[in-house]
Image (cartoon, rainbow, N blue to C red):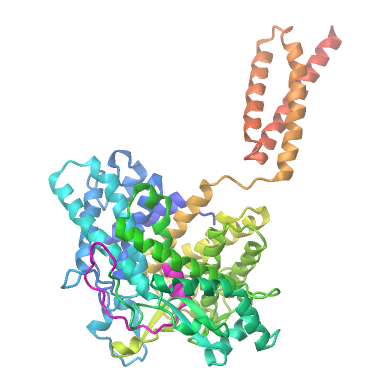
Amino acid sequence: MQIKPRQHMLDIWRAMARHSFDDGKLVWEDTDGLSSVADAERLLCLLYPATEVPAFRLDQPDTTERDVLRALEGVGSRLEIPPNLIAALSQFMRSHTGPDDSPTFAGGHYFRPAEPQQKLTHEQYQLGVVDSYSMSVTLCLATLGFLKVYEPSTTRPEVRKAIGELREATNTRLTAAMISLLRSFTVNVFDAESEQGKRLIQVIGQDRQSDRAVLQQFSRRFRPLRATIIESLSRGIQVDESIRDESQLFECGWAWGVVKDAPTVTDLDVQVPGQPDGIADRLPYVYFTVIALDGIQDLFSDRTLTLGLLDADQQKLAEALRLRWELSQQYWSAIARFGSERWPLEDLPWQTTGLRLESEYFSLTVAAILVHDLVRRKATDDDLTRTVAIMERLADRGRVTSRMTRNDPAIELHNPGVTMPLAGSERSGGPLQWRMTDFSAQLLKRIIQLAELSRNIDAQDRLLRLGEQAFEHLWNRRIEDGEGAGLWDHARAVYPDARVGRRLSWSITERVTECLVAARNLYEQQPIRSPELAELARDLLSEATHLFGREQLEASTSADGSRSRAMRSIESRLDHARSLVDDRPATAFALALPVLQELDTLAQARGAAAQEV
């Protein structure tokens, strides 16, 4: 199934407008408790494409395209859509603000009890989580960009007042989300002889070397990164002083929430209320690290920089987050590719060290960080090609591209999903868990990112075919009728043995929306240039140019009007083909062939006419 970003995005918008809007007003849900994560995901299904894809822009009503307006009829008319979106965003900001006017980042019903008989308290539902911090960064940046472009186009006093209030609330929430991300970053230092140390050595050593040899290699490989972390102690990174000892192992990344004893951020011009004490253990999770990386990279996007969306305090926070963003990418990318032979990442499934869990989902999250690192350093080398093979294996093992067998354990990846204990959550009154059900959508997202990065024709072709298979799998999982028709997720449509049937998931729906935006960016790129075809195209054009020049010698002696028109057409097509040979050699090659055929036909006709004379 070919990915058609425009058509499929319009289908999602049409379904969302039908499900979530009533007479232009967003209908809010309260499923098992308020969740800022789910609410942000739902709004991003509309706002993310509207601010990232020019064809879907809603912030300049005069330029909104007709098929977009038809898809969003339930949201309002051309002039009503922006104010209705502002009203929905304003309601989101109010709903997720605490009594002290500070933004809240409740995980809500996304938190799950560790024991079946355990009931979550209101306070537990209200706990902040990295998913919410990261989603809020993306949502707030999209909102600020939307307001900045839309504001000059309206003169209605009540709308301009709503814009000013929403901008203030959004800036406050953005700053709070960035602070929370800073306070959730952690570096975990542990001894090589500890249980966690032995597990890490086993994962990266692949049992091919002695533990001592692996420890020495780790020390050499991570010496520059360790030095950067030590140097960063003065820039707010909290880490045990034992990291200076090169015999100690360490991990860095994001915990599930604000870590216990994390200091408050005070060196800002404007103080943000509400920096609650953290309860999370200082244990990095690869899942929450990926989620954080996805949100933080939006702080440095071209749109954010071009529109100047960050104020002075936010720019200071962004630089601090960028340091942690780079540290995490470099660390996990190096861990994934550790050693000189088989990568630890190629040994599926990945085993986490702190929680002692293993799953293809964790392999995918580590691969996602590797993709982030490949994009950061624009790597188009062997690393990318090997990552393609990992994606193909994950798609197969996750039964995205292969048939589900009887009693297949792979179904647990999708339904009910992979569950993680949240270390330190017992401090809230009882241990909590977090469940991930978006394996297929995350896989598709990373496949498309790799395809966008790849400059190798074979690798990109493999990725495109894999992406189309993964997208078809996901598209078949849409809810067909009833609540949430046209949205996700209906796992039983592809996995008949799934425990749960239809269940509206804004998490999966938002991930699919991100995939379509990424696919659009992929198709906007120039196709990969083939040096071999470029050389052949130049040879063809050289011969065609020479033959055209020969035919021009005869053209002036002929009074045949059709021949003159043919010659002008050939000249125009030759000029066009020459202009494409550097960027699109295959197209230039295809254009040159009929020109050569036509020149041969003209030459034969001229020769036959000469014989008759």
* Outermost residue, right side: 611
**Towards the viewer: 130 or 78:** 130
Residue 559, position as x, y percentages in the image? 69, 6
Say whether residue 38 is visible.
no
Image: magenta residue range: 267-292
Examine the residues drawn in magenta and state their main secondary structure. loop
Taking 464 as reference, is 248 above or below it? below
| Magenta stretch encompasses residue 268 | yes
Residue 532, position as x, y percentages in the image? 74, 44
**Towards the viewer: 184 or 403:** 184
Q: How many marks?
A: 0
Could you tell me which quadrant the N terminus lies in?
A: bottom right
- The residue at the point 36 percent across, 91 percent down is 115
Residue 546, position as x, y percentages in the image? 77, 23
Q: Quadrant of residue 431?
A: bottom left
**Towards the viewer: 517 or 599:** 517
* Outermost residue, left side: 157
Could you tell me which quadrant the C terminus lies in?
A: top right
In the figure, is residue 221 to the left or right of 228? Answer: right
Residue 90, position as x, y percentages in the image? 21, 59
